[in-house]
Image: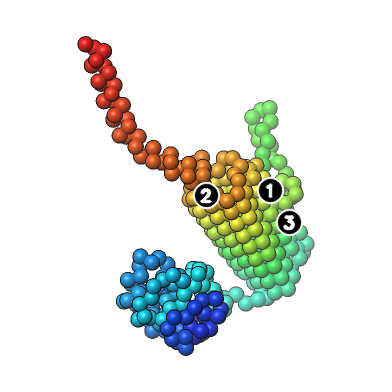
Amino acid sequence: MSKHKSFTLEELAKATGSLVIGDSSCSVDNLSTIENANENSITFLSNKKYASSIEQSKACAVIVSSDFKEDGNCNYLKSSDPYLAYAKISKLFKIDDDVKIPFVHKSAVISDKAKIHKNVYIGPNVFIGPNCILDENVVINANCNLVKDVQILSGTIIQHGSVLGSDGFGFAPNEKGEYLTIPQIGNVIVKDNVSIGSNTVIDRATLKSTIIEKGVKMDNLIQIAHNVIIGENTVIAAQSGVAGSSTIGKNNMLGGQVGIIGHLKMGDNIKYAAQSGVTKNMKSNQTLIGFPAVPKEKYIKSYIIFKKLPSIEEKIKKLEEKLYNLLSK
């Protein structure tokens, strides 16, 4: 972390809506882990079971939950959501000296049919094809390809090596068993304040649009197929994939390696455990686990039985032996 900025705990409390316990005039100039903190650091307690490590820390202050019982030997920032407080503070310390806006690298290739608005960053070896539109304050990092017909709205950041607007996986079998390519003539629309990780692919729609709604956050190595709609403020972890024409609701949370088959409609506020495989439409406000993915409560009940299967099998074998012996007499 940079040491070019410093803040008092009082200033950080105001910025995060937290409560200072201790010396509010104490100044910090870096974020650090509990173990590596120095006297000018502020750190973050992610789990209460590690509270004992605070005693050995040299940190000036620790971000903790509102119900944390402090011992008086340290300064604290108490927050109802300590992880969010940490995120806000980390943003205060961050210096964006690696991205200077506006900027277009000399190696970038931009179609004369593309439209680039002001305050845009376009990194090395970026390709922007015909009919692409970049709104204000968009960042396209190195080696990205916006193939064609891609609209990126304000405040969106696309990390290195991602490809948007390429052909979707569209093929039709003929009477000879061969596959004919279906032209993909739609577009991609990425709305405001979206974050797209490195080496992610978002395919152009067959017809109409593939849409990433505002506030969506996507990790690295994600595949979004043609005509998919990702709802507002949904977060998707690495190596997940959504097949064609599926719709993901608002505020969904997809763990790593989640797979969703095509033509499904998912509700709002759904959480998907890592490696879940979704094969049918799902209602809002639930947690899904497993393949095929089922609600958490059903999965736990099934897993309890699954763990007992070896002992149940052994009991059945013993019963079969007893029955055989009885019938043999």
* Residue 283 visible: yes
Q: Is residue 188 above or below residue 12?
A: above
Q: Earlier in the sequence, mark 3 or mark 2?
A: 3
Measuring from the top left, give residue 95's x and y in whole percent: 55, 79
Residue 240 lies left or right of residue 206; in this view the side is left
Q: Is residue 43 above or below residue 134?
A: below
Q: Amino acid at mark 3?
A: Asp
Residue 157 lies left or right of residue 23; in this view the side is right
Residue to which mark 2 is pinned: 287
Q: Is residue 2 above or below residue 211?
A: below
Label 1 with label 3: CB-CB less than 8 Å = no
> Which of the image's four quarters has the C terminus?
top left
Q: Amino acid at mark 2?
A: Thr
Residue to which mark 3 is pinned: 149
Q: Earlier in the sequence, mark 2 or mark 1?
A: 1
- Count of numbered marks: 3
**CA gap, disc 2 to disc 1?**
25 Å
> Regarding mark 1 in the picture, which secondary structure is present there?
loop
Q: Amino acid at mark 1?
A: Asn
Measuring from the top left, give residue 269's x and y in whole percent: 59, 54
> Regarding mark 3 in the picture, which secondary structure is present there?
loop
Neighbour tally class for label 1: few under 14, some 14-19, many 20 plus, Cα within 10 Å: many
Q: Earlier in the sequence, mark 1 or mark 3?
A: 3
Measuring from the top left, give residue 279's x and y in whole percent: 57, 40
Residue 199, quarter of picture: bottom right
Q: Residue furthest top?
A: 329
- Give the foreground label among 3 and 2: 2
* Residue 200 visible: no
